[in-house]
Image (cartoon, helix red, strand yellow):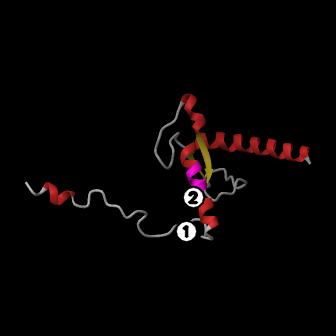
Amino acid sequence: MQDFIAEARKHRKEMESTYRERALKLFPWVCAKCGREFSGKRLKELTVHHRDHDHDNNPNDGSNWELLCIYCHENEHARYEDEQYHNAKPGQEKKGPTHTYKPFEGLAALLNKK
């Protein structure tokens, strides 16, 4: 059993390196969520995210991938896990405001008081 698990992990790592290399050739080295740019030693912080969460779906055109920094990638998977937990269908986000606090609500009135 240990050999099977080790082989599966080795295969996964080989696949990840292959589609990561292809994704880095296809896309600019920018996080698709936060817009941070990566190069040099920091390029290792840029990861490949599978939009449909299926790591076996790796089309040659990269249509199932997006480059995300490690922080945005973790956030994306956490959001997906939350959706799964609450029985929401993946890809369908709740509509409406995500927050209720409006920090600049009365600013126009204050500026016009002069």
Residue 113, how many percent across, how many down?
10, 57
Q: In which quarter of the image is the C terminus?
A: bottom left
Categorize mark 1 by other alpha carbons within 10 Å: few (<14), some (14-19), many (20+).
few
Residue occupying the far left of the picture: 114
Residue 69 visible in rendering: no
The residue drawn where x is 62% and y is 46% is 48
Q: Quadrant of residue 101?
A: bottom left
The residue drawn where x is 57% and y is 34% is 43
Residue 84, how many percent across, how many down?
64, 65
Whether the magenta-drawn stretch holds residue 66 is answered as no
Residue 80, how many percent across, how many down?
60, 60
The residue drawn where x is 91% and y is 43% is 3
What secondary structure do most residues of the magenta stretch adopt? helix
Task: Specify start and end residues of the magenta stretch as a single range.
Answer: 74-78
In the rendered view, tell whether residue 46 sits above or below residue 32. above
In the rendered view, tell whether residue 101 sits above or below residue 36. below
Categorize mark 2 by other alpha carbons within 10 Å: few (<14), some (14-19), many (20+).
some
Does the CB distance between marks 1 and 2 fall below 8 Å?
no
Q: What element carries label 1?
A: loop
Q: How many marks?
A: 2
Q: Mark 2 points at which residue?
A: 79
Label number found at residue 92: 1
Residue 6, how many percent across, how many down?
85, 43
Amino acid of disc 2: Arg
Q: Quadrant of residue 10?
A: top right
Residue 109 visible in rendering: yes
The residue drawn where x is 22% and y is 60% is 106
Residue occupying the far top of the picture: 40
- The mark closer to the camera, 1 or 2, is 2
